[in-house]
């Protein structure tokens, strides 16, 4: 029985066949290079006693073949002269058919299930990676800019069987001939040469904030592996997370608590904190992988979701406003933290001076004047501005569109809040701090930490 014939994409005279011989149970794959006049057996490396069901040629690399048997999947890098397993997490089952669909290998099984190997770039560039002296950064395929689903669903419990989506954003692969001896970094630059995102092999500090959802929701931190072999890393096509004082999954760090519904909850992939960074706009990006001081460069093309009706100008305007929001979040966050350190020092100094009424009263007065600047309630101060900008960043991320006048107006109102709070902080430091610091010095206490607020460019103006 001839299960399938696959004509070569590169050579009209070449074709492949998967055949079953009813006289035995061995695999039988054949190749012709003369329009079918003669056929050569190409089954070296396939296990005996397991029938073959399908053979396919990769539509990019004619030397790359895929085969399916009654016990799994196999790959050949030399037009079928030698085969090796391509099993990964595929159960040992009958592979009834295979198809290369774009960058993916799709497999059907006798159990009527599909298994998809996402992005076969490492297979197509295996020879180049093997020939690399130390490391190899694979040429990435075009990435698609797609926004998350807006459905605010609770993820399925981990024990419920469910399919997996492909990796999010751009799939980036690299190969290390030997374990890296020094730092490994991956930097991503836009077409103007500006740094968009950078990753490294250094894990981030552990997050000790109490989660208000199950831990199994969260994805692992983005850390580049340094061991020998091929490694896959996916960039979510976003800028770094903003400096928000409160996030969706945690109680606020301010004097209020805020929880919002998540709209990207997938077991093992959910971002630990939201809001997340803004999406990049489509274009050409430069990737720079640095291993042990040696840098490897590739270029990545990102296209927009074909379902999106937004124009490039609209997306650029949206990103520009999101960058203003991110800058405002950073300036209000930094000012909040500076004031928090100042208030903490004031409280410690009050405990040290004991019953000195003048010093205690002065410290209490200063703390009372600082408190509104970091409050998370109302419509004034760094805390409230950071809260509102965080909400606005989430709103802007719900779709592709040109920001509305109300969007722009709301951002400008928060930025004005930050500027006004900065002016008030400067007044407090000029009027109240000098006298208090003289009294602290007289009491042999350390000077108070500086709490200079943001400049006039509160939102990156």
Image: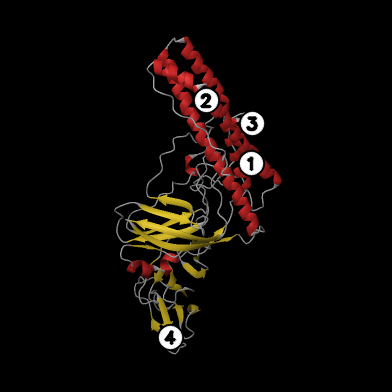
Mark sitting earlier along the chain (2/4): 4
- Mark 3 to mark 4 CA distance (whole Å): 76 Å
Report the mark closest to the observer, 4 or 1: 1
Are the residues flagged by discs 4 and 1 in contact, CB closer than 8 Å? no
Report the mark closest to the observer, 2 or 3: 2
Say the numbered circle drawn on residue 207. Answer: none
**x%, y% of residue 140?**
46, 63
- Mark 4 to mark 1 CA distance (whole Å): 66 Å
Residue 344 sits above or below residue 95 on the image: above
The residue where tag 3 is placed is: 379
**x%, y% of residue 27?**
40, 74
- Mark 2 to mark 3 CA distance (whole Å): 24 Å
The residue where tag 2 is placed is: 430
In the image, farthest residue toward the bottom: 37
Callout 3 secondary element:
loop
Q: Quadrant of residue 383?
A: top right
Report the mark closest to the observer, 3 or 4: 3
Are the residues flagged by discs 1 and 2 in contact, CB closer than 8 Å? no
Of residues 96 and 127, the one drawn nearer to the viewer in this rendering: 127
Quadrant in which the C terminus is drawn: top right
Sort mark 1 into few (<14), some (14-19) or many (20+) by Cα contacts within 10 Å.
Answer: many
The residue where tag 1 is placed is: 411
Sort mark 4 into few (<14), some (14-19) or many (20+) by Cα contacts within 10 Å.
Answer: some
Mark sitting earlier along the chain (4/1): 4
The residue where tag 4 is placed is: 33
Mark sitting earlier along the chain (1/3): 3
Q: Residue at x 62, y 55 (%)?
A: 315
**x%, y% of residue 209?**
47, 34
- Mark 1 to mark 3 CA distance (whole Å): 13 Å
């Amino acid at each position: 029985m001839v299960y399938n014939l696959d004509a070569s994409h590169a050579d009209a005279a070449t074709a492949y066949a998967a055949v079953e011989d009813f006289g035995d149970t061995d695999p039988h794959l054949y190749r012709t290079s003369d329009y079918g006049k003669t056929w050569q057996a190409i089954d070296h490396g396939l296990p005996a006693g397991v029938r073959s069901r399908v053979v396919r040629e990769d539509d990019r690399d004619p030397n790359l073949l895929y085969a399916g048997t009654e016990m799994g999947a196999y790959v050949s890098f030399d037009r079928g002269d030698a085969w090796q397993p391509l099993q990964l997490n595929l159960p040992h089952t009958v592979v009834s058919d295979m198809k290369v669909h774009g960058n993916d290998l799709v497999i059907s099984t006798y159990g009527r299930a599909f298994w998809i190997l996402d992005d076969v770039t490492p297979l197509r560039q295996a020879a180049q990676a093997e020939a690399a002296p130390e490391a190899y950064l694979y040429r990435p395929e075009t990435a698609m800019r797609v926004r998350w689903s807006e459905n605010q669903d609770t993820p399925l419990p981990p024990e419920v069987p469910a399919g997996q989506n492909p990796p999010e954003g751009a799939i980036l692969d690299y190969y290390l001939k030997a374990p890296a001896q020094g730092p490994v970094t991956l930097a991503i630059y836009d077409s103007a040469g500006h740094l968009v995102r950078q990753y490294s092999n250094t894990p981030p500090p552990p997050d000790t904030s109490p989660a208000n959802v199950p831990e199994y929701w969260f994805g692992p931190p983005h850390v580049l592996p340094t061991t020998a072999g091929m490694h896959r890393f996916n960039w979510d096509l976003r800028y770094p997370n903003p400096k928000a004082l409160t996030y969706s999954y945690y109680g606020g760090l301010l004097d209020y608590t805020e929880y919002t519904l998540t709209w990207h909850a997938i077991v093992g992939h959910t971002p630990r904190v939201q809001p997340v960074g803004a999406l990049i706009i489509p274009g050409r990006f430069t990737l720079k992988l640095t291993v042990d001081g040696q840098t490897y460069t590739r270029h990545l093309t990102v296209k927009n979701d074909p379902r999106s009706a937004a124009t490039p100008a609209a997306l650029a305007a949206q990103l520009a406003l999101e960058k203003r929001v991110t800058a405002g979040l950073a300036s209000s966050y930094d000012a909040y933290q500076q004031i928090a350190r100042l208030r903490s020092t004031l409280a410690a100094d009050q405990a040290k001076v004991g019953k000195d009424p003048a010093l205690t009263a002065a410290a209490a007065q200063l703390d009372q004047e600082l408190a509104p600047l970091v409050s998370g309630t109302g419509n004034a101060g760094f805390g409230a501005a950071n809260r509102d900008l965080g909400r606005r960043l989430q709103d802007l991320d719900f779709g592709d569109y040109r920001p509305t006048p109300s969007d722009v107006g709301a951002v400008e109102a928060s930025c004005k809040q930050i500027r006004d709070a900065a002016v008030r902080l400067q007044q407090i430091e000029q009027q109240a701090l000098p006298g208090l610091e003289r009294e602290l010095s007289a009491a042999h206490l350390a000077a108070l930490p500086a709490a200079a607020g943001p400049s006039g460019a509160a939102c990156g103006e």
